[in-house]
Image: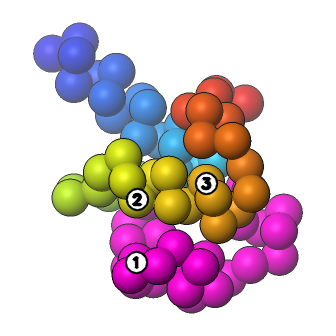
Amino acid sequence: MKYNNKISDMIIVVGKNVKKYRIEKGMTQQELAFHCDKTDRCTISNLECFNCNGLNLRTIIKISLALNVDTYKLFIHT
């Protein structure tokens, strides 16, 4: 059970950071999705709402590149 809690906590951290950096860059979810090559707005929305079904590392890397943020920073609790 502890393992699942840690995963849930990390999903929340990543979701909050994606939203924070997206807003800092003045981007909408749609604009971010567009710059993530073959990612749709629902994927961004789901991530920001902590629903990460089907999310993979490749998508997180695309998001970090589109936001011009080092990928590891999406995983840091702020």
Q: Main secondary structure of the magenta part?
A: helix
Residues 13 and 36: in front is 36
Residue 64 is tagged as: 3
Q: Which residues are magenta?
A: 19-47
**CA distance for labels 1 and 3:** 13 Å
Q: Earlier in the sequence, mark 2 or mark 3?
A: 2
Can you name the residue that lies furthest to the top here? 2
- Residue 72 lies within the magenta run: no
> Do we see residue 38 in this rendering?
yes
The reply to whether dot 2 and dot 1 touch (C-beta < 8 Å) is yes
Q: Amino acid at mark 1?
A: Thr
Q: Which percent across, then down, holds residue 14? A: 52, 43
Give the vertical position of 51 relative to 72 (above or below). Answer: below
Q: Earlier in the sequence, mark 1 or mark 3?
A: 1
Residue, x 20% and y 58% (percent of image)? Answer: 54
Residues 70 and 50: in front is 70
For numbered disc 1, what is the local secondary structure? loop
Q: Which percent across, then down, holds residue 45? A: 46, 72
The chosen color scheme is: rainbow
Could you say which quadrant of the image residue 41 lies in?
bottom left
Q: Where does label 2 land, which residue? A: 59
Q: Amino acid at mark 2?
A: Thr
Give the vertical position of 61 relative to 49 (above or below). Answer: above
Q: Which percent across, then down, holds residue 58? A: 37, 53
Q: Is residue 19 left or right of residue 39?
A: right
Q: Where does label 1 land, which residue? A: 39
